[in-house]
Amino acid sequence: MVLCALRWIRPGRAGLGRIVGLRPFSSSLRDLQRSIDPAHLQFDVALFPPLEPPPSTRVDPFNLVEPDLRPLADSLKDLVGVDHPVLNKVARHFFDMQGKRFRPTILLLVSQALGTPRDSPVFSAQKRLAEIAEMIHTASLIHDDVIDVSDMRRGARSVHKIFGNKVAVLAGDFLLARASVLLARLGDVKVVELMATVLEDMVHGEMMQARAEPEDLVTFEHYTLKNYLKTGSLISLSCHSAAVLTGAPHDSALAVSARDYGRHFGVAYQLVDDLLDFTASEEQLGKPALADMANGLATAPALFAAREFPEMNNIIQRRFSQEKDLEVRRP
């Protein structure tokens, strides 16, 4: 039984209230790409008091980039247009779903922060990069749904439930291939290297999740590194690439700052997403709630709760495999 996991996550408590103690990465690009040290992704909850509620603001980040974000769905469908009717239908099915377009939004905001004129060739390249990032993300979701046997995505039936596993896998592969072609056409070798590293990281993260030992499942080191590889890498290295497209050297302060911004945003995004798995409804999520635990995965809420209720460690290590492991006792 997941003992009081939701009770533990309440306003005024430490824990998810403050996750800002992230240590900076090494400045070495090789260290960032190839051998992420889990210690660099750690946060010590005890060091920080709970966050105060954020100040109210009237700025909607989606509105800031809305003119460029609005046509994204149509441009994506045009970019993945293919003569094969089944692949075309699969791609259009997924892009017709109304997702958050979170990653393109972040990249367009980073482009603004970098001061890129909207009528410049650099902005066109950054906008294409945003489309490529969304295509890579979409391909990863299609593959994830096959691996996790998920029936729903964005409130609709998953691709593999409609077209079958083989077609879903091939459609994901096709999107990655098309993204790679578009990436090569940007003509920047360093950007190609950075974004190719994203694909490598995603596979490493998926393997970490699939092949984890029981003792790994209860550590934040494993959890945060896996999250970076599966989720944060795409956001971090896409932001890094957006800065490189301005002509900044990849190891310049500007490019490294963009990379680190994306990394921290990616960590925060996944933590909030994991929390919503406990607190949001199926209608809000567009997929079943507690899906991660149903798939045997312990995320931040369960790991934090296990600090207060050590008996949860055995439940986490057996991947919530017993009948009552997924029950949540509410206060």
Image: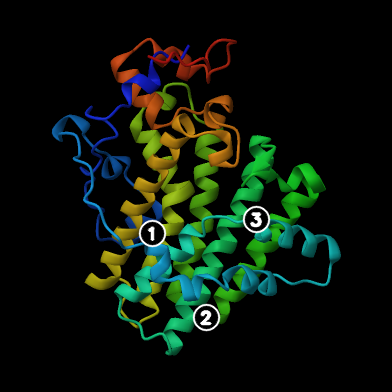
Which residue, given by chain and number where applicable, does mark 2 sit on?
186
Mark nearest the camera among 1 and 3 is: 3
User: Would you call the spot at circle 3 few (<14 residues within 10 Å), some (14-19), or many (20 or more)?
Assistant: few
Quick check: 289 above or below 240?
above
Separation of disc 2 and disc 1 at Cα? Answer: 19 Å
Which residue, given by chain and number where applicable, does mark 3 sit on?
97
Instruction: Please provide percent x and percent y for residue 182.
Output: 60, 75
Camera-nearest residue between 195 and 18 = 18
What's under tag 1, amino acid-wise?
A: Ser
Relative to 91, is 76 on the left or the right? left
Instruction: Please provide percent x and percent y for residue 33.
Output: 39, 57
Instruction: Please provide percent x and percent y for residue 263.
Output: 34, 54
Judged from the image, the secondary structure of the residue bearing numbered disc 1 is helix
Mark nearest the camera among 2 and 3 is: 3
**Residue under the point 33% across and 26% down:** 9
Which residue, given by chain and number where applicable, does mark 1 sit on?
236
Which of pointers 1 and 3 lies earlier in the amino acid sequence?
A: 3
What's under tag 3, amino acid-wise?
A: Met
